[in-house]
């Protein structure tokens, strides 16, 4: 009888421990997503030029990370999350390319042509209108130039510069070597600077 | 512009780009922030209603079962000539035969014949002398 009570107590404690662990894990994931979601959305949006679809892709990446990799360490989450997101972005771009070919076949225009980077630009943040306009225009032209980069250069630039990942974690997110990341990033920066001109700021 | 100047110009450009990006992130509108919040909570909720472990093996099991069936049919399975004639084929044969239609038209007659059909054995004579 005593042994039964003891095993019951141990079982309850184990379940309680598991519940606490789950809650802690969820809280950590919540913090991680809250920290990364806005930059991830903007990176996805710049890549695919569509905010609604970018939101969907970010949510899908969050779900996949939470389902499959919640048990990994927090340090691994960022490259994993961006790897999932970049895969989703590439899938979206492939589907869009096929869709565009079909639309061209039926004589309709591409959806991407409707995207207005200035209209999708963020709300003002208490700055003078001319400053705001200048910043919006600079960001809009930067987005257009980034969208025109080759895919790997675009990924390397945004992960290194916008997300602030180091070379090793960018390589993990992109699934390539650190040397490739350095090459892609360097070419991307140089190409963007040449495209936008010396007076861009 | 030498290599060092180019690198310096690239670095300055990258810093400027980072600044514009951070501003655009900081100024995201309320609707988008709200949708991100909802997306985050939906993702966290999805982990609580995650599929049972065996579900993830379903695709692999399906492929394995299909492979086994294909292997059996290709190598060790019964040959087509050994298979029983399907019922559908025999039904078609009956329906397409001319005599079956005649039989259907005179079904009562054949029923009567069936009732009065003589046995194969000849009846023994009542007073056999021999």
Image (cartoon, grey):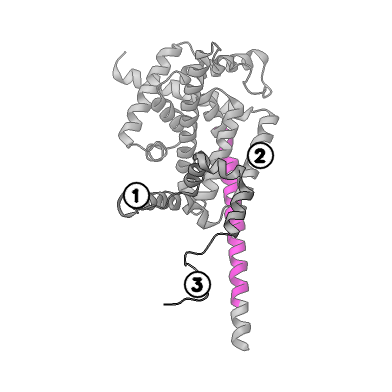
**For mark 1, does the 10 Å Cα neighbourhood hold few (<14), some (14 to 19), or many (20 or more) residues?**
few
**Which of labels 1 and 3 is toward the front?**
3
Q: Which residues are magenta?
A: A10-39
Report x, y in % for residue B31: 70, 30
* Residue shown at the point (56%, 41%) measured from the top left: B102
- In this view, the residue in front, A130 or A103, is A103
Q: CA distance from mark 3 to mark 2?
A: 105 Å
Q: Chain of mark 3?
A: B
Q: Which mark is residue B103?
A: none
Q: Nearer the viewer, residue A56 or B6?
A: A56
Q: Mark 3 = which residue?
A: B125
Above or below, comparing residue B117 to residue B2 in the picture: below
Q: Is residue A16 visible?
A: yes
**Mark 1 and mark 3: Cα distance apart in space:** 51 Å
Letter of the chain that mark 2 sits on in the rendering = B
Comparing B2 with B116, the one in front is B116
Q: Secondary structure at mark 3?
A: loop
Kindly report which numbered mark, 1 or 2, lies closer to the viewer in this rendering. Answer: 1
The residue where tag 1 is placed is B81
Please name the residue shown 58% across and 29% down the image. A53
For the residue labelled by badge 1, is the local secondary structure a helix, a strand or a loop? helix
Q: Which residue is mark 2?
A: B37
């Amino acid at each position: 009888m005593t042994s039964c009570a003891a095993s019951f107590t141990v079982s309850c404690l184990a379940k309680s421990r598991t519940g606490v662990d789950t809650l802690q894990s969820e809280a950590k994931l919540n913090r991680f997503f809250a920290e990364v979601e806005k930059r991830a959305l903007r990176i996805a949006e710049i890549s695919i030029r569509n905010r609604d679809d970018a939101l969907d892709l970010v949510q899908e990446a969050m779900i996949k990370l939470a389902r499959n990799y919640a048990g990994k360490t927090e340090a691994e989450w960022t490259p994993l999350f961006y790897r999932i997101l970049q895969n989703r972005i590439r899938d979206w771009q492939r589907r869009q390319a096929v869709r565009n070919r079909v639309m061209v076949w039926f004589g309709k225009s591409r959806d991407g042509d409707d995207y207005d980077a200035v209209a999708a630009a963020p709300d003002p943040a208490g700055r003078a209108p001319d400053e705001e306009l200048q910043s919006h225009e600079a960001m809009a032209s930067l987005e257009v130039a980034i969208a025109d980069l080759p895919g790997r250069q675009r990924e390397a630039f945004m992960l290194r510069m916008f997300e602030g990942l180091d070379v090793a974690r960018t390589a993990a997110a992109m699934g390539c070597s650190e040397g490739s990341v350095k090459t892609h990033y360097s070419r991307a920066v140089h190409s963007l600077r040449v495209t936008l001109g010396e007076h861009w700021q | 512009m030498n290599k060092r100047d180019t690198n310096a110009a690239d670095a300055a450009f990258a810093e400027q780009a980072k600044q514009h990006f951070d501003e655009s992130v900081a100024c995201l509108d309320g609707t988008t922030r709200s949708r991100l919040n909802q997306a985050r909570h939906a993702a966290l909720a999805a982990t609580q209603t995650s599929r049972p472990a065996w579900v993830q093996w379903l695709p692999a099991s399906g492929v394995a079962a299909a492979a086994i069936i294909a292997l059996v049919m290709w190598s060790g399975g019964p040959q087509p000539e050994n298979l029983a004639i399907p019922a559908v084929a025999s039904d078609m044969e009956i329906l397409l035969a001319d005599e079956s239609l005649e039989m259907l038209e005179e079904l009562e007659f054949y029923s009567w014949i069936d009732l009065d059909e003589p046995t194969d054995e000849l009846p023994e004579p009542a007073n056999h002398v021999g």
